[in-house]
Amino acid sequence: MSQYFSPFVLPFCAAVLVLLGICIWKYVRWYKHFDRLQKAIFLKNLISWKFIPALWEAFREGILHVRISRKNLVLGYMHRSIALGWFLLIVVGAIESHMAPTESHPFWMGIFFRYFVHDTPSPGISMFFANLMDFLLLYVLSGITLAYLKKVYSRIVGMKKVTKHVIFDQFAKFSLWAIFPLRLLSESLSANLYHNGGFLTQSVGDLFSSSFASTFELLSWTCYSFSLAIFFVALPFSRYMHIFTEIVLIFFRHLGLKERTAKTGFTMYELSACSRCGICIDNCPLNKQLAIPNVQSVYFLRDLRYKRVKPEIADNCLLCARCSSDCPVNIDLMSIRQQARHKQELDTQHNYQYLDNIQPFNAIGRVGYFAGCMSHLTPAIPEAMVAIFEAAGQKYWYMDEDKTICCGRPLMQQGYLNQAGELRRKNIEMIKKSKIQFLITSCPICYQSFKKEYKLPVPVIHHTEYIAGLLQSGKIKVRKDDLKTVYHDPCELGRGCNIYKEPRQILKKTTQLVKAKSEKEDSLCCGYNLGNTLINNEQQKKIRDAAFKNLMHKKPDVIATACPMCKKAFKHSMDFPIRDIAEIVKDNLIKK
Amino acid sequence: MAISFGFTISQTRVVNMDNCDFGKLHQLERITPSFKKCMNCGACTATCSAQQFVSFNIRKVKSLYTMGQLGGLDKELAKCMLCGKCTLVCPRGLNLRPIIMNMRKLLTTK
């Protein structure tokens, strides 16, 4: 043992113990803060086959970083080289130290191998390992070099803006960046003295004089051990907590856990899984069009994790979910944002007792149609829907023809959970008692609410899904006009409910569909989303104008959309034809 | 003879502006300066979803708030469903939802 011990391994060993202790302590504490349902789901699914796909995803995302690579290849390479390279350095190092013919194999052997072991009986194998380890080190160093370059010029990895880190994160980052150059230096100095290096460390080592090497060898290894120790101790408190937490989170997700309406221990896992990579910054409309620099998800999650989030940060978000679709860790950013907006004592009960005496309608054998508040401001949409129902011979019940009960999503988004629940209960009662076959809604905001927040006994579909179904089954027939039409993906319908296909199917049958510059998951928010209460009308218009420019890419004649809110946004002080899909279908109907 | 028009005339009210407390008004104007742009047209009230079910007049609430007549306004504001139609129809481009939320917050907090 004494042969393979030197005082410089102590900081490293102590730090590993501290790291493990803190991580386990944190994970157990967060688990205790799960709510009852989450604990039940966790325990129910704990022993299942779900572990196998989870393991695969953990390897793919935690080590290979596939989702980041899809965003940008160089950025993906940078993360992969550091993660995969370091992982293999640890694994191969451990194998190498265990294969070495030494009488004991303490666990730090793999890390400081070349300081302790100088000659082995089989030079072929040791040369193989030395070269392999050198190759892995070079791989990691290439990633670290890219990280340095990214700091100077971030566009090299396809990012316009990078995260502004807090001092502590900077400190942890520089200790990480110091580890591998110090490892190179230490191994090179040892290689100079004992000639046990591979292609990289030996050639670097030979640059030094042997007196220099013998003077600084121990110091260099000590610095290496300290840099590892500093990084490990800083890890659980800095952004690097994501390294382990992301993997735990992937397992939790595969076991069926997700965010709840209130903050739980699961939220803590999600907050710590954020690597603060800053990919969410560039495409955030508030950053891009309004240059508001400090409200993006990365800063919001950080502030929430360190318990210093301010309402003006939490409230300043459109909830357009652009960052959610960009996030390489797939954190449920929208739910966390809504949790943080919880209004506590302002969220009172029994506010809507005036709705109590509204009687449901007996609608057996009909479909329900819920236009939504906003559709009442764009009456052409419900009118078109009524015409389509009649053309298809569909009996319907127009639920909110003269009086609209809000679906509750706007309240939900602003953190009035009780109040939203009250509206929801009323709507559920109305729908249940009416005995409709299924519910059609014209407003993606209501649609998302009905689909995700309500537990309805009947299916809910958006009117684009309904019309696409009618066209497919031949219940209505349309002619095709020759107007060039571009489709604007509403946030709530696209990124919110994953409906991209149906609207395009309809438009392809009714008109000449052209592409926008960025669409589907990458589409731009119109800015009039109900999520944000802090930006003013001028700022909304700026965001809208950017979305408009994006749509004008192929010079279309008409903009088509499927959301009354988006329609209203593009109508606001603008003179360009914008129509809902329902209107286009209605105008192109072939009368039987 | 009583004829129902579906609405009634508000009761006459005398407010002595010398004795009003404008503290909450100034607070609100600090948080949402656009509040000052309101011209009392009442488009918000006409479109309001809650108003279809119950007597709820956001324009009146605004006027009372401006004059410091704050009694019972928080109960009144709680009727709002926050659907946002008022914001979209406002000809002055006011963002009414935060104004309603902040008014309620200021009225509830001492």
Image (tube, coloured by chain):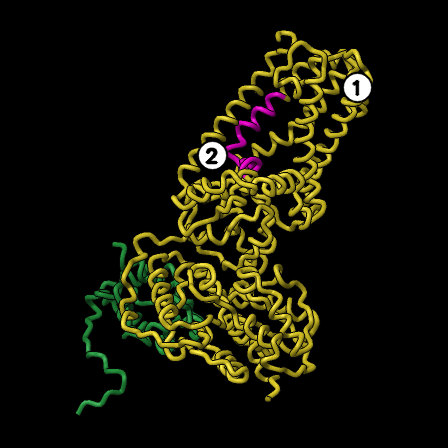
Image quadrant where one finds the N terminus of chain A: top right
Query: Measured from the top left, where is residue A177 in percent x and y?
Result: 64, 32
**Magenta span:** A225-245
What letter labels the chain drawn in yellow?
A: A
The stretch drawn in magenta includes residue A242? yes
Residue pointed to by mark 2: A27
Tell me the SS state at disc 2: helix
Q: Are marks 2 and 1 in contact (CB under 8 Å)?
A: no
Query: How many numbered discs sit on the rendered protein?
Result: 2
Q: Circle 1: is it few (<14), some (14-19), or many (20+) Cα within 10 Å?
A: some
Check disc 1 and give the amino acid type: Ile
Q: Is residue A183 above or below residue B20?
A: above
Identify the image quadrant of residue A163. Answer: top right
Please name the color used to draw chain B.
Answer: green
Residue that carries the numbered disc 1 in the rendered image: A125
Report, in whole angstroms, how far the alpha carbon at label 2 lies from the one at label 1.
Answer: 41 Å
Q: Position of residue A145 (x, y in %)?
A: 71, 36
Residue at 61% of width from left, 62% of height from top? A523
A566, A335: nearer the viewer: A335
Nearer to the camera, A167 or A318: A318
Left or right side of A330 for B82 = left
- Main secondary structure type of the part rendered in magenta: helix
- As drawn, the residue found furthest toward the top would be A2
Q: Find numbered disc 1 in the image and state the secondary structure of the residue it sits on.
A: helix
Quadrant of the image containing the C terminus of chain A:
bottom right
